[in-house]
Image (tube, grey):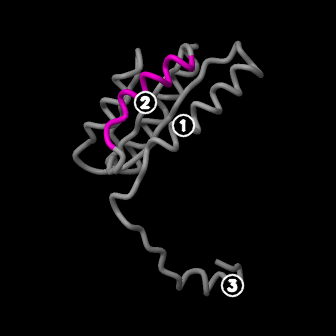
Amino acid sequence: LRLASLQEASRRVLEMKPGGTLFKPALTRASTLFLEGSMQAPELVPMLVFMSDGANTDGGMSPTMSKLCEEAAGLQCHTIFFGTGGSTRLRKMAAAVVGGKYHLSIGGVELQHAFEAIAADLTAL
């Protein structure tokens, strides 16, 4: 979208196709970043905050999460589902990490509370 004018931008309709999310590429990238971070600052604790509507198309991620835990020692994991009903896949992702936490966020207030809980965990380190 070219930045011709705010009026033109406001008339644009952005389309989103539901159910097309792939979790594995994001987790693979996180793994790479955790490895780089551990080499540059080994004293830091790796943390993954993974948000989704839970509608991924690449299957369960528990094996990928287990591998991520092996690669990123001490990994802290928070998964946040936004929407109604919850997500079994995001629950299982959090459960695959020792101490992993799953947060349900139906709206903005719950999302704020989820981030406040995550921030509180950071100060506990």
Circle 2: element type: helix
**What residue is disc 2 on?**
64
- Residue sitting at x 58%, y 19%: 123
> Which numbered disc, 1 or 2, marks the residue that appears first in the sequence?
1
The x, y position of residue 5, in whole percent, is 69, 84
**What residue is disc 3 on?**
5
Q: Residue furthest right?
A: 40
| Amino acid bearing label 1 | Thr
Q: Along the horizontal axis of the image, is 71 left or right of 103?
A: right
| Amino acid bearing label 2 | Thr
Distance, label 1 to label 2, CA atoms, is: 8 Å
Image quadrant holding the C terminus, namely: top right
The x, y position of residue 102, in whole percent, is 35, 31
> Which numbered disc, 3 or 1, marks the residue that appears first in the sequence?
3
- The residues colored magenta run 59-72
Magenta stretch, main secondary structure, is: helix
Answer with the quarter of the image where residue 20 lies.
bottom left
Front one among 119 and 55: 55
- Residue sitting at x 51%, y 16%: 70
Distance, label 3 to label 1, CA atoms, is: 38 Å
**What residue is disc 1 on?**
28
